């Protein structure tokens, strides 16, 4: 389901700040959303950590069941109602995700658009496995994109949803991991956990710090195994990436990425990955998707609109685009020589400045 089903380890997590010999340190791994999730929890009794992880895992499974865009659940039921032109009831479990989707759609100028599930399905990415075979006819794809399904078409009256556009089909893969990890943080707070890191296939949410040091993590190289850069995350910071290098369809020697530009229905080209640091996992996840689509000419405007201060993009030639705030945070780990393009700084005021 979703881009949650993307890959094991989009980032290499170093976790060098953790001392496994320390008391009150607990680690557990689970395979959910088609992704390896690692929980590292400090400074609480093991039994408390186990209960928190168990509850988070149950919540993740419920998300997988109800948000799945191609297996029976609440989202597929809602999508079917929209296609018929009917309204549908929305549970309190799904309603907040739709509201967040509408908010991030507006902030991203429509580049983050969870209403394009029909386009994602047409490309074959509504599946747990990589699509195979021929790509869809481009004229059909562009025709579907021209119908312009968007979150602006979606209207909620309490818990009743309707859409003015029958081609709207929800797919929350563009930020599903962020929503899930944010929820895990809420659960951990309920159990009195203050220091933890949650790694879902390399996308990271942090709480507190391990001792008096930050969490040190690595941003995965988009081509080779290993880290292209490392960064130290401060308490409560999240690190997310959107990458084209693991989920794609290949036809006649051409690779078409799973990240779809909602404006024309075509897979994103040129930008291989976008990495974002923010204090909200859902927004960071959505922003990484939107910035990949925005590309080298427009990413800075979208980052500013979404309140994202720390951004790094890598294109298919190995060129790195980075804003000054992010450049101060990262340390390049690769011996390769990269061309680094530093954006002109815009107005900065607080953590939402770029």
Image (cartoon, rainbow, N blue to C red):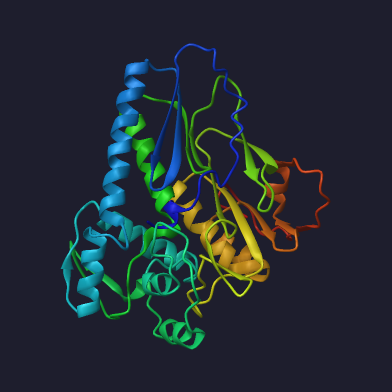
Can you see residue 162? no
| Image label count | 0
Which image quadrant is residue 304 in?
bottom right
Residue at screen point 56% across, 19% down: 211
> What x and y, as percent, mark residue 170?
33, 66
> What x and y, as percent, mark residue 112?
47, 65
Residue 106, compared with residue 100, is above or below; it is: below
Residue at screen point 37% across, 65% down: 102
Between residue 228 and residue 306, name the one nearer to us: 228
Between residue 19 and residue 5, name the one nearer to us: 5
In the rendered image, the quadrant that contains the C terminus is bottom right
Residue 309, compared with residue 130, is above or below; it is: above
Q: For this view, does 79 lie left or right of residue 10?
A: left
Can you see residue 14? yes
Q: For this view, does 241 lie left or right of residue 163?
A: right
Residue at screen point 37% across, 77% down: 149
Q: Residue furthest right?
A: 337
Q: For this view, does 53 lie left or right of residue 124?
A: left
> What x and y, as percent, mark residue 253?
64, 71
In the rendered image, the quadrant that contains the N terminus is bottom left
Between residue 179 and residue 11, name the one nearer to us: 11
Residue 278, compared with residue 75, is above or below; it is: above
Between residue 230 and residue 58, name the one nearer to us: 58
């Amino acid at each position: 389901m979703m881009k949650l089903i993307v890959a094991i380890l989009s980032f290499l997590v170093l976790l060098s700040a953790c001392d496994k010999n320390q008391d009150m340190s607990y680690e557990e791994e689970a395979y959910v959303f088609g992704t390896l999730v690692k929980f590292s929890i400090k400074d609480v009794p093991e039994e408390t950590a186990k209960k928190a992880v168990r509850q988070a895992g149950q919540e993740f499974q419920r998300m997988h069941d109800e948000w799945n865009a191609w297996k029976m659940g609440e989202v597929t039921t809602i999508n079917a109602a929209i296609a018929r032109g009917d309204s549908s009831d929305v549970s309190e479990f799904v309603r907040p995700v739709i509201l967040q989707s509408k908010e991030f759609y507006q902030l991203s100028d429509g580049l983050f658009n969870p209403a394009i599930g029909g386009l994602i399905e047409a490309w074959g990415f509504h599946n747990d496995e990589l699509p195979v075979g021929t790509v869809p006819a481009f004229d059909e794809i562009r025709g579907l994109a021209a119908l312009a399904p968007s979150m602006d078409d979606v209207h909620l009256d309490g818990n009743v949803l309707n859409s003015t556009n029958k081609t709207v089909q929800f797919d929350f893969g563009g930020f599903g991991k962020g929503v899930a990890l944010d929820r895990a943080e809420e659960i951990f707070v309920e159990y009195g956990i203050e220091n933890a890191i949650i790694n879902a296939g390399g996308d990271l949410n942090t709480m507190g710090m391990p001792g008096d040091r930050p969490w040190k993590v690595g941003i995965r190289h988009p081509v080779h195994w290993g880290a292209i850069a490392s960064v130290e995350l401060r308490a409560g910071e999240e690190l997310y990436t959107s990458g084209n290098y693991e989920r794609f369809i290949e036809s006649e020697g051409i690779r078409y990425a799973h990240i779809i530009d909602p404006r024309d229905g075509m897979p994103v080209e040129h930008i291989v990955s976008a990495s974002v640091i923010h204090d909200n996992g859902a927004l960071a996840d959505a922003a990484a998707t939107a910035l990949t689509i925005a590309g080298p000419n427009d990413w800075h405007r979208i980052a500013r609109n979404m309140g994202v201060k720390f951004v790094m993009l890598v294109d298919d030639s190995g060129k790195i685009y980075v804003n000054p705030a992010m450049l101060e945070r990262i340390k390049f780990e690769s011996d390769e020589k990269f061309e680094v393009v530093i954006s002109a700084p815009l107005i900065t005021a607080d953590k939402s400045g770029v």
